[in-house]
Amino acid sequence: MLFTIVSLLIAPMAAQPAPSKSVCDVGRAILADMRPWAGDETYLETDPERSGLMKLCPDLRTVLPSGYRMVNDDARRRADIHAPLPGPRPIAAYIYAIGSPIIATDGRSATVEVLCTCTGLCGSATRSRYIRTPQGWRRDGKPRMLWVS
């Protein structure tokens, strides 16, 4: 009985298996496809507790797409403003968080969701499909809008 209790307590602390190389390769393709929102400040969520991709592939935290900044507390605070405030309008912050890519069982395609939170009554989520080609992973068509506000 004591062994069972100790086993249950230790099991959650066991190291998680490393993600497949394909997941991180898809992640690199996603980052390469990202374009910043024009006009204000665009950020990428690099906190592994807030982005599935960054938790699975921590090396990608240093590979920011062109025009993106690593998110910080000030950007998070501005993105959380969802109502007019007195005084001057704050510089808008657009924060993108990339979910964990889901690789198909045959290994030839993957889907991923990207969530955007932003200053004002603003936000969106998209889903993209990626396919494996001899040259690497590439997006198959345009991202599909899941919701927008």
Image: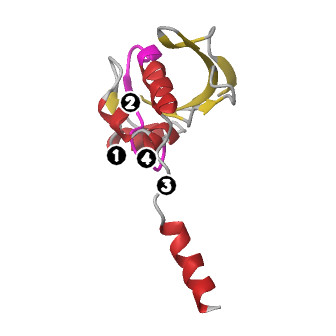
Asked if one can make out residue 34 in the rendered structure from this viewpoint, the answer is yes
In the picture of the structure, the residue carrying the numbered disc 1 is: 73
Quadrant into which the C terminus falls:
top right
Residue 54 x, y percent position in the rendering? 43, 39
- Give the residues drawn in magenta, as a range: 32-50
Dot 4 falls on a residue whose secondary structure is: loop
**Looking at the image, is mark 3 or mark 4 earlier in the sequence?**
3
Q: Of circles 1 and 2, which is in front?
A: 2
In the picture of the structure, the residue carrying the numbered disc 3 is: 16
Q: Residues within 10 Å of mark 3 (few under 14, many from 20)?
A: few
Callouts 4 and 2 close, C-beta under 8 Å: no
**Dot 2 amino acid type:** Tyr
Q: Residue at x 39, y 39 (%)?
A: 46
Q: CA distance from mark 1 to mark 2?
A: 11 Å
Q: CA distance from mark 4 to mark 1?
A: 15 Å
Q: CA distance from mark 3 to mark 4?
A: 14 Å
Horizontally, is 19 left or right of 140 in the view?
Answer: left
Q: Of circles 3 and 4, which is in front?
A: 3
Q: Residue at x 65, y 91 (%)?
A: 1
**Looking at the image, is mark 1 or mark 2 earlier in the sequence?**
2
**Looking at the image, is mark 4 or mark 1 earlier in the sequence?**
4
Horizontally, is 127 left or right of 54 in the view?
Answer: right
Residue 55 image-quadrant placement: top left
Q: Of circles 4 and 1, which is in front?
A: 4
Return the mark for residue 48.
4
**Dot 1 amino acid type:** Asp
**Looking at the image, is mark 3 or mark 1 earlier in the sequence?**
3
Q: Of circles 4 and 2, which is in front?
A: 4
In the picture of the structure, the residue carrying the numbered disc 2 is: 43
